[in-house]
Image (tube, rainbow, N blue to C red):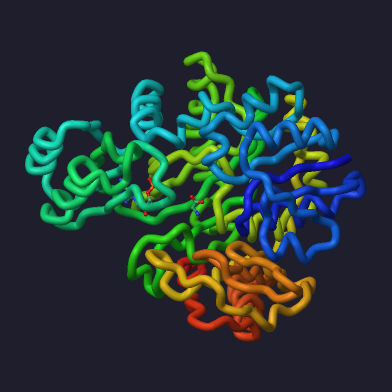
Amino acid sequence: MKILVVGSGGREHALAWKLAQSERVQTIFVAPGNGGTASDIRLENISLTDPTELAEFALKEQIGLTVVGPEVPLAAGIVNIFRDRGLKIFGPTKEAAQLESSKDFAKAFMQRHAIPTAEYKTFSELAAAHEYIESKGAPIVIKADGLAAGKGVVVAMSLDEAHAAIDMMLSDNKLGDAGARVVIEEFLAGEEASFIVMVDGKNVLPLATSQDHKRLKDKDEGPNTGGMGAYSPAPIVTPQLHARVMREIINPTVQGMAKDGIVFTGFLYAGLMIDEHGNPKTLEFNCRMGDPETQPIMARLKTDLVQVMEHAVNGTLDSVELEWDRRTAMGVVMAAAGYPDTPRKGDRITGIPAETAECVTFHAGTALIDKQLSVTGGRVLCVVGLGDTVKLAQKHAYETVEKIHFDGAQYRRDIGWRAMNRKH
Ligand code: AMP
Ligand code: GLY
């Protein structure tokens, strides 16, 4: 079978890497891919990004399955476009993708279906938003309604910060249309976890749990990023909590969408905040896999992903049982100088070792030009170590990170600290 993976990040490299392990695969095209997918002889990059052009390509090449990584093509309706042409694709329709592409849609949906989340109100008018903030006090969270590539959320610890965030979005239009409406919500304290499932329209298949590290610097300091590292499993998600999240958040979401007339298919990612008593609330929905969560999750998946995807597009996920490597997988992101605001491009990358049973390096912002790898974007690599303990997984990841070089590389030294500190 020929497969198409849409996207160019570490998530897509990890998905393509895992799909390529299946004996059923003839060729995997990655659109547009990166330096890592270009270097893998089982994968072939194609320089297309427009959803309609991709559908034409899929028809011409008789692609049997398409898997979409990022949110932007999903929100643009790539799944609708492919299905209209009779092509098999795994992802949510444009309508279902609103769970991620509009925070207001997601919040109203959660409220309507009694799914636990922070209290909120939506504004498009400046004065009313400022007044609401004054009445609620800080800390408080301001979110742009639309997709803003990870820049749309301000966790304001003071009223000054909150007012500035409102001005930035509603008055200075710094986020364009995405920030023309804002959701203002209650600040939630606790520990975050990423809860990702596959949905085929009716059946739900949970993937292994994971935890991301959003801040740039050690000890969770510095600016928010797309994610500086992730590991799987996340010990905070105990079997009891897992059952509760399925019962209180995931199942009501899939059923609630259906009740509202929208069949959900694709990956569904609930970003959870778990309070000190172990109660989960939904911070956000994504309608795709997480990046970098995908990298450690794929490194642990033992089941043939092509087979799983086929069940997903055929509506038979209830017949799948996933098998996981029992080890912990830990992904450490190496980012470019200047990330997240002004990532520097062009630095040469050297020293990436070959994959072993204990470590695999996924590419994101890289390109392969004349056999030379160079930096092309913010998050450059994600080095995933595997080990029987969290500590061992961490050791394997960092041993490899230290062998890799590009000027100005930034990475956190403490990925996995919450799991390391945890008393079992
Ligand atoms: P989101 O894109 O909505 O997940 O927000 C990005 C990050 O902002 C989350 O991963 C949290 O770290 C933080 N955040 C979002 N909403 C809240 C909230 N209500 N309370 C505290 N932190 C939040
Ligand atoms: N790592 C967070 C995300 O993919 O949204």
Placement of the N terminus among the 4 image quadrants: top right
The residue shown at (34%, 70%) is: 221
The residue shown at (47%, 52%) is: 193
**Residue 105 in sight here:** yes
In the image, taking residue 23 as reference, residue 145 lies left or right, namely left
Q: Position of residue 362 (x, y in %)?
A: 67, 65
In the image, taking residue 259 as reference, residue 104 lies left or right, namely left
Q: Position of residue 144 (x, y in %)?
A: 31, 41
Q: Nearer the viewer, residue 77 or 20?
A: 77
Q: Nearer the viewer, residue 216 or 135?
A: 216
Does 194 appear above or below 197? Answer: below
Q: Residue furthest front?
A: 370
Does 301 appear above or below 411? Answer: above
The residue shown at (60%, 85%) is: 402
Q: Position of residue 52 (x, y in %)?
A: 65, 31
In the image, taking residue 75 as reference, residue 13 lies left or right, namely right
Task: Quadrant for residue 119, please give it.
Answer: top left
The residue shown at (38%, 28%) is: 105
Question: How many numbered tags mark residues here?
Answer: 0
Q: Position of residue 307 (x, y in %)?
A: 82, 39
Does 131 appear above or below 277? Answer: above
Q: Nearer the viewer, residue 152 or 60?
A: 60
Does 137 appear above or below 417? Answer: above
